[in-house]
Image (spheres, grey):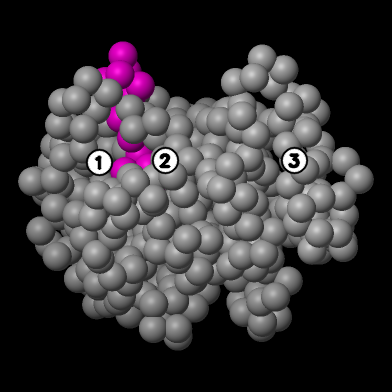
Amino acid sequence: MLTIRGGQKRFCDGVSRRDFLAIGGLSFGMGGLSLGGLHRLEAAQAATGMGSKLAHKSVINIFLGGGPPHQDLWDLKPDAPSEVRGEFKPIGTNVPGIQICEVFPRLAQRTDKCAIIRSIVGCDGAHAAFQTNTGWTEASLRTLGGRPSLGAAIAKIQGPVDKAVPPFVGLAAKTQHGPWSDSGTAGFLGPAFGPFRPDGPDMANMQLKDVSLERLSDRRSLLSSVDKLRRDVDASGTLNGMDAFEQRAFDVLTGSKLLDALDISKEDPAVRAAYGDGKPYQFQYDGAPTCNDHLLVARRLVEAGVRVVSLSFGRWDSHGGNFAMVRDHGPKLDQALSALIDDLESRGMLGDVSIVVWGEFGRTPKINKDAGRDHWPQVSTALLAGGGMRTGQVIGATNRLGEHATDRPVHVQEVLATLYHNLGIDTQTFTVVDATGRPQYLVDKPAIAELL
């Protein structure tokens, strides 16, 4: 980690403003986005006329890691036997005929701005965010590096909106079960298109010594210190010191809109209060915290020019204590997601920002002996909002017990295709080139016609 000492301002999970100068640290590979590499890409695109011509559209991908119980969120089964329907009651929404779980009273008053899919299929059952980031299984094109995530593909295709802001940011907090904090890999596109992660790669031994924030105006001294750091780190000579791209990358980290966007202390206190902080963190175990702040940071990032933001909210792997977990996680998600929808709408951004909320699979219809629900990849749900989509509707249905889709099965890839469409990419015609030079479609399925 590249650490630059300075003053502190606190963020979710105790991360400080000072730490955000340590974050991003001129990422030397290690799976993070290389900002220098991003700027090289930008220059190459400019030279070939491939820079973005599209209006700024964005996606916020909210991953409910662990597999949220579909029949306890958006697809309640009040007429099922007690061992299936569970403890929750459905409540009406502001769209006649649509009901959702009682733990979402705020979202119930904003359902006209949401689309609920109750028939997601195609999940492979892996306890990971990979499919919700890419639409594919992890085995697909693994020998070539794997399929790129939505964020990586957009970083490659459209590049940055603003030279000082990465196009793809991953906010997913580090989890003990690593696949739940996967913000979306670059796959065969190469690491330069992976997410910028504010927590940075694990390079704690790399520290820029004796340079404080007060000395950042002395750029020549700073760059000299970074050059010495790089020489010390890479005695083999593989790294050749900072070039113009690295200097621009450093500019991103020390004086840009990116750092301002990450600093929620600059946000209106009333807006912060509307989102809440999601504390206390309960039922986290090996998963993500219910960090409501991340949804606020996501709004600030897309406003600053980020095209794709991914994050992980909560730990939904409820083999035991399912109903207590939903009673904790549900209201927190209800508050933060409702605030995000309102916030984007009040700023005139909701039509340009697509929100998707989903997990890797659903959960068993029958409640187990520990008051939990187990893995159920046969069907799951998703909630979408914004992005110019036709909202205020439910798509698909499951049978009386929530076991399988009976009406309009929607494949995981169709959701990804819809998000690409909202970003201006037609997945039925557009391809990206893999490491062998072969064109590859981003996904195989079409966008969801009902939402377009």
Please state if 163 lies on the left or on the right of 267 as rendered.
Answer: left
On screen, residue 182 above or below 145: below
Q: Which mark is residue 226?
A: 3
Is residue 287 in view?
no
Where disc 2 sits, the SS reads: helix
In the picture, which quadrant includes the N terminus?
top right
Q: List the residue tagged with mark 2.
A: 193
Q: Is residue 310 magenta?
A: no
Rendering quarter of residue 121:
top left
Please state if 448 lies on the left or on the right of 416 as rendered.
Answer: left
First reached walking from the N terminus: tag 2 or tag 1:
2
Q: Label 2 amino acid?
A: Phe
Percent x, y for residue 407?
A: 11, 48
First reached walking from the N terminus: tag 2 or tag 3:
2
Q: Label 3 amino acid?
A: Val
Rendering quarter of residue 335:
bottom right
Q: Which mark is residue 161?
A: none
Q: Closer to us: mark 2 or mark 3?
A: 3
Percent x, y for residue 427?
A: 15, 47
Please state if 66 lies on the left or on the right of 448 as rendered.
Answer: right
First reached walking from the N terminus: tag 3 or tag 1:
3
Looking at this view, is 171 or 78 the one in front? Answer: 171
Which residue is situated farthest in the right direction here?
210
Percent x, y for residue 450?
A: 12, 62
Rendering quarter of residue 227:
top right
Q: How far apart are the two marked residues, 3 and 1, measured between alpha carbons?
A: 44 Å
| Residue under the point 20% across and 49% down | 417
Q: List the residue tagged with mark 1.
A: 412
Tell me where the magenta segment starts and ends, as one range: 141-154
Please state if 216 lies on the left or on the right of 135 as rendered.
Answer: right
